[in-house]
């Protein structure tokens, strides 16, 4: 059962949110229950610390008179529940939602313009979460997760073409189908982490064997399925031919 | 004794004097400028590396003309010194010109800023007029007891405000969080270009941004390339929109530019010289962006295609962060 947390400083709105969510959970038969409904962010955090697993969070952005705002609360919640669903509720249309989504992977935001729009937002969020959970159940995709400064990137392993090490630094470049980024790490560690699907074809390259399109034996070049190219060393030729 | 005195005290003293002289002439700055201009830097490098050859060669040449060894050496030294002074003069002049250009740019940007603020004031004045009319209309409706009409009036008024000045006000308040004048200027220029192109810009600067540990000219160049690329891709499209986010966090600052993709990204081509998402030979391309970013150890580039959007991020770590 997914616990639902509500953090809203205005008592009247908090009451309306709780009543409406309870009603929706009952009508739709969702496997959820209201765990904490409070205007105090610390109370929410205490409950999250004690709970295990993911939860649903409806957080007010502007928490007047409290020790933290919705953004900081979201950051704290993420420490304990990295996969939970965070939805922001705000009085202002001009919420910096890109920033919220980028740092906290916030699912959505609801504007408290009128009671109708707020209720519609709450209802929509619950149905999106249920859809997401169902989709996740059917998916058994393996992800490669890596920290890039202050965020963690998740890339499906079957979308990674190869890793390239920059000479003289600890910088590794990931080349994928939809992602290209640099991070700090070492090819040796990645080799151990990713297992046999990846082959160290060259001092500077760790290649996803399943994504190889063709080999240029003369130029000692590998062409990947996305069209990118990387190199292989002379003594890896035999192993490469064996694997593809 | 005199020899010893000359060797132990005079030489270091002369050397220090020479260093002080170089420092006073701001030679370091001038040399840095050479580095920025590839061709002149190359020329300067050649001059520096062939200096001993030129020195001895010149002296030999003069000795061939019958000049004494010491005299020729001093003469060549003087020529070299004059050349150095000339170089320095040219460098300083260039520096002054650059400073002047930068000042002009800031002035231009400030003018643009004032222009935008004046525009907003004008809109506000117009809205005030409409607002009065609307209020009296609403007053009448409420007096008649027609609550639905009155509610409709309120809704319309909020929407009007949002569409008339809300957008600009929002943009300006976000821009107000950028405290680095060069970046503020760049954003202002791009915002006005986008306005001309009828491209909407969603700018987000949630926390104040004071600066990053990245050379200012490089940061402006990189961010400029990313925004230009996004603008190129959406120009002329229906509901053209560019998203720009600057997020200053405790350990690092993230610049993020996002736009809808209308073309398939040609991955192997993307990092080649002169390529942008719109096609080859457009703009400065991502290759020079990548080249600049790779020079910094505390900067990481991120590119992604997600849900039909092309996303570019530039992440700059603060040096004191782990």
Image: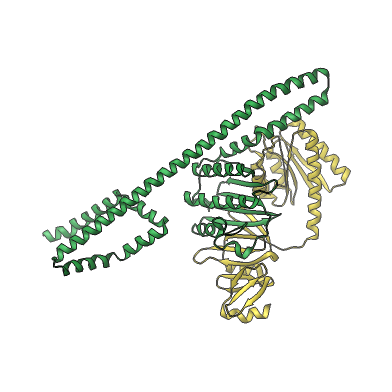
Chain colours: A yellow, B green
Is residue A1 found left or right of B64 in the rendered image? right
* Residue A36 picture location, percent across and down: 76, 40
Would you place residue B11 above or below residue A125 in this image? below
Which is nearer the eye, A56 or B246?
B246
Is residue B137 found left or right of A95 in the rendered image? right
* Residue B286 picture location, percent across and down: 56, 58
**Viewer can see residue B269:** yes
Residue for point 70% across, 66% down: A158
Q: Residue furthest top?
A: B143
Would you place residue A168 above or below residue B316 in this image? below
Quadrant of the rendered image containing residue B168: top right
* Residue B150 picture location, percent across and down: 79, 24
Which is nearer the eye, B63 or A138?
B63
Quadrant (top left/top right/bottom left/bottom right) for the C terminus of chain A: bottom right
Would you place residue B127 above or below residue B303 in this image? above
* Residue B98 picture location, percent across and down: 41, 47
């Amino acid at each position: 059962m997914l616990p639902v947390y509500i953090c809203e400083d205005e008592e009247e709105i908090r009451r309306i949110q709780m009543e409406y969510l309870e009603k929706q959970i009952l009508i739709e038969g969702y496997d959820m229950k209201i765990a904490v409904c409070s205007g105090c962010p610390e109370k929410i955090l205490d409950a999250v610390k004690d709970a295990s697993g993911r939860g649903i969070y409806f957080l007010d952005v502007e928490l007047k008179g409290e020790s933290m705002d919705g953004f900081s609360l979201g950051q704290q919640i993420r420490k304990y529940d990295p996969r939970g669903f965070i939805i922001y509720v705000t009085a202002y249309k001009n919420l910096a939602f890109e920033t919220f989504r980028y740092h906290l992977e916030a699912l959505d935001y609801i504007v408290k313009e009128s009671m109708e729009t707020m209720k519609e937002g709450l209802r929509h969020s619950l149905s999106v979460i249920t859809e997401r959970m169902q989709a996740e159940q059917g998916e058994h995709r393996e992800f490669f997760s890596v920290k890039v400064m202050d965020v963690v990137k998740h890339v499906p392993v079957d979308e990674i073409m190869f890793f390239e090490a920059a000479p003289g630094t600890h910088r590794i470049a990931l080349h994928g189908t939809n992602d290209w980024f640099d991070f700090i790490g070492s090819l040796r560690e990645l080799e151990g982490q990713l297992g046999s699907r990846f082959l160290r074809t060259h001092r500077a390259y760790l290649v996803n064997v399943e994504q190889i399109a063709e080999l240029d034996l003369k130029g000692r070049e590998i062409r990947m399925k996305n069209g990118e190219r990387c190199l292989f060393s002379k003594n890896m030729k035999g192993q490469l031919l064996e694997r593809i | 004794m005199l020899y010893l005195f000359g060797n132990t005290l005079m030489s270091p003293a002369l050397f220090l004097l020479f260093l002080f002289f170089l420092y006073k002439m701001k030679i370091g700055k001038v040399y840095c400028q050479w580095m920025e201009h590839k061709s002149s830097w190359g020329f300067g490098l050649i001059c520096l590396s062939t200096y001993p050859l030129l020195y001895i060669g010149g002296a030999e040449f003069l000795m061939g003309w019958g000049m004494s060894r010491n005299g020729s050496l001093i003469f060549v030294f003087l020529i070299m010194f004059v050349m150095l002074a000339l170089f320095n003069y040219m460098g300083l002049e260039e520096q002054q010109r650059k400073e002047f250009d930068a000042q002009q740019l800031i002035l231009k940007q400030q003018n643009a800023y004032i222009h935008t603020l004046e525009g907003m004031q004008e809109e506000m004045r117009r809205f005030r007029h409409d607002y009065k009319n609307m209020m009296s209309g609403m007053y009448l409706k409420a007096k008649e007891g027609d609550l639905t009409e009155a509610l409709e009036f309120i809704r319309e008024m909020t929407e009007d405000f949002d569409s008339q000045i809300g957008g600009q006000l929002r943009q300006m308040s976000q821009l107000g969080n950028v405290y680095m004048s060069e970046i503020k200027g760049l954003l202002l220029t791009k915002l006005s270009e986008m306005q001309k192109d009828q491209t909407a810009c969603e700018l987000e600067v949630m926390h104040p941004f004071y600066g990053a540990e990245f050379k200012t000219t490089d940061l402006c160049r990189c961010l400029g390339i990313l925004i230009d690329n996004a603008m190129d891709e959406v120009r002329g499209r229906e509901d053209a929109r560019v998203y720009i986010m600057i997020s200053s966090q405790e350990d690092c600052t993230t610049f993020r530019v996002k736009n809808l993709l209308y073309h398939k990204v040609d991955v192997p081509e993307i990092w080649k010289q002169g390529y942008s998402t719109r096609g080859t030979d457009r703009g400065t391309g991502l290759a020079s962006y990548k080249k600049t970013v790779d020079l910094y150890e505390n900067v990481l580039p991120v590119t992604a295609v997600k849900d039909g959007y092309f996303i570019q991020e530039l992440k700059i770590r603060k040096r004191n962060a782990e």
